[in-house]
Image (cartoon, grey):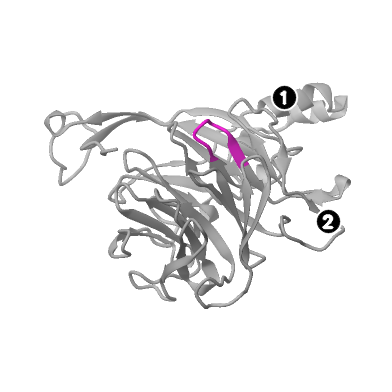
């Protein structure tokens, strides 16, 4: 899909919140299927039930569509169980890949939770080995990109799991990384975006790993980062960055110019409302009624941001056990409908 010459961004209204502590237990990341199914990779534990995880299946209507990959807390980790789940992606064949920073392999499943095995398994720095795998992305040919954080590189595998190539080394120069985390691959527009965690920046490459540009620096101001963990790009080329240390998602245009930030606007989800009305005690409802709710709407501990083909932005609100959803309202502009870029941008119509 060709990107527009320019974009009239009308707004990014908050849509809704889904999930609750009983289901989306510390969601670290989500994968969005074309049919709107949401796969939430969770990190928290049901201590009362003696298990942790899982991958929870839901949709924008907050329906419980099942779960899989639970871990029994009383047993050692084995095949489809997690310690420190990080990111999840879905390829065009319907295969889910999930990373875990506590181990040196990825898990693979079908969409209905059938376990397909693991990729990797040896901790190290040789091709195909990992040291804290984190960010994941797939391209148009279902090649898999794995951010190999403590090896300060990205590895690429074909759809059958064969190693293709790797790129990156430790450092702060263009093309170097310091514990990279998130990644987004856009094959159609020949772009790869990497959230360079300890360098507090996002680097942009073409698909041959030729450096294009970078943006960001350490800090809490506009366009600055404190450990960026996730990156996503929408159909217009706008770039969304999960700014973990600043508890926000920042939005940039396709050239890396800051546009705005999201801090969180959560309301009670459908699931939470059912629990409050039917399960909470009278005392718990009184505490909620008298609480200062201002802080309740904000993000806390967010590690990822994803943009679906439906134009919705999904933010797994990790420490609040929920997923906040926004929708971009924008309109394409042709070269005839807008002036060339201004030297001193302003919204003053005069």
| Residue 13, percent from left and from top | 45, 28
Q: Residue at x 68, y 44 (%)?
A: 113
> Dot 2: what SS?
loop
233 shown above or below 311: below
Residue to which mark 1 is pinned: 273
Q: Is residue 226 visible?
A: no
Residue 153: in sight, yes or no?
Answer: yes
The residue at 83%/56% (across/down) is 73
Q: Is residue 113 left or right of residue 175?
A: right
- How would you rate the neighbour count of disc 2 (Cα within 10 Å): few for under 14, some for 14-19, many for 20 or more? some
Q: Is residue 302 magenta?
A: no
Q: Residue at x 55, y 43 (%)?
A: 94
Name the spot of residue 77 as percent of width and height, x first.
77, 62
Would residue 92 appear left or right of 266 to someone viewing this image? left
Identify which residue is drawn at 46% across, 70% down. 153
- 158 or 47, which is in the foreground? 158
Q: Residue furthest top?
A: 277
Distance Cα–Cα, label 1 vs label 2: 29 Å
Q: Nearer the viewer, residue 306 or 127?
A: 127
SS under mark 1: helix
How many C-alpha atoms fall within 10 Å of the one at disc 1: few (<14), some, or many (≥20)? few
Of residue 20 and residue 49, the one placed in the foreground of this image is 49
In the rendered structure, which segment of residues is drawn in magenta? Answer: 32-39
Residue 207: x and y, percent? 32, 59
Evaluate if marks 1 and 2 touch, with contact meaning CB atoms under 8 Å apart.
no
Q: Quadrant of the N terminus?
A: top left
Q: Earlier in the sequence, mark 1 or mark 2?
A: 2
Residue occupying the far front of the picture: 160
Q: Main secondary structure of the magenta part?
A: loop
**Which residue is identified by label 2?**
73
């Amino acid at each position: 899909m060709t990107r527009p010459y320019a974009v009239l961004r009308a707004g990014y209204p908050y849509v809704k919140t889904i999930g609750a502590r009983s289901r989306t237990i510390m969601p670290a990341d989500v994968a969005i299927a074309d049919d709107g199914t949401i796969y939430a990779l969770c990190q928290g534990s049901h201590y009362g039930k003696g298990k942790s995880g899982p991958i929870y299946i839901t949709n924008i209507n907050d329906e419980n569509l099942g779960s899989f990959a639970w871990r029994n807390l009383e047993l050692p980790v084995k095949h489809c169980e997690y310690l420190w789940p990080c990111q999840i992606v879905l390829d065009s064949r319907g295969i889910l890949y999930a990373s875990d920073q506590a181990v040196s392999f990825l898990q693979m499943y079908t969409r209905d939770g059938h376990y397909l095995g693991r990729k990797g398994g040896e901790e190290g720095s040789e091709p195909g080995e990992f040291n804290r795998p984190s960010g994941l992305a797939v391209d148009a040919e279902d090649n898999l990109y794995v951010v190999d954080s403590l090896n300060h590189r990205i590895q690429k595998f074909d759809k059958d799991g064969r190693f293709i190539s790797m790129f990156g080394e430790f450092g702060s120069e263009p093309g170097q990384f310091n514990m990279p985390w998130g990644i987004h691959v856009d094959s159609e527009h020949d772009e790869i975006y990497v959230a360079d965690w300890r360098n507090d920046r996002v680097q942009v490459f073409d698909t041959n790993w030729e450096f294009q540009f970078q943006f960001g620096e350490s800090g809490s101001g506009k366009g600055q980062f404190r450990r960026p963990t996730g990156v996503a790009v929408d159909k217009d080329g706008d770039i969304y960055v999960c700014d973990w240390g600043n508890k926000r998602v920042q939005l940039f245009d396709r050239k890396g110019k800051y546009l705005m930030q999201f801090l969180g606007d959560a309301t009670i989800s459908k699931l939470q409302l059912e629990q409050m009305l039917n399960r909470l005690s009278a005392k718990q409802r009184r505490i909620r009624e008298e609480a200062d709710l201002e802080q309740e709407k904000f993000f806390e501990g967010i590690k990822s941001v994803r943009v679906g083909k439906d134009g919705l932005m999904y933010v797994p609100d990790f420490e609040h056990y929920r997923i906040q959803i926004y929708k971009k309202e924008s309109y394409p502009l042709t070269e005839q409908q807008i002036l060339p870029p201004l030297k001193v941008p302003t919204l003053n119509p005069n």
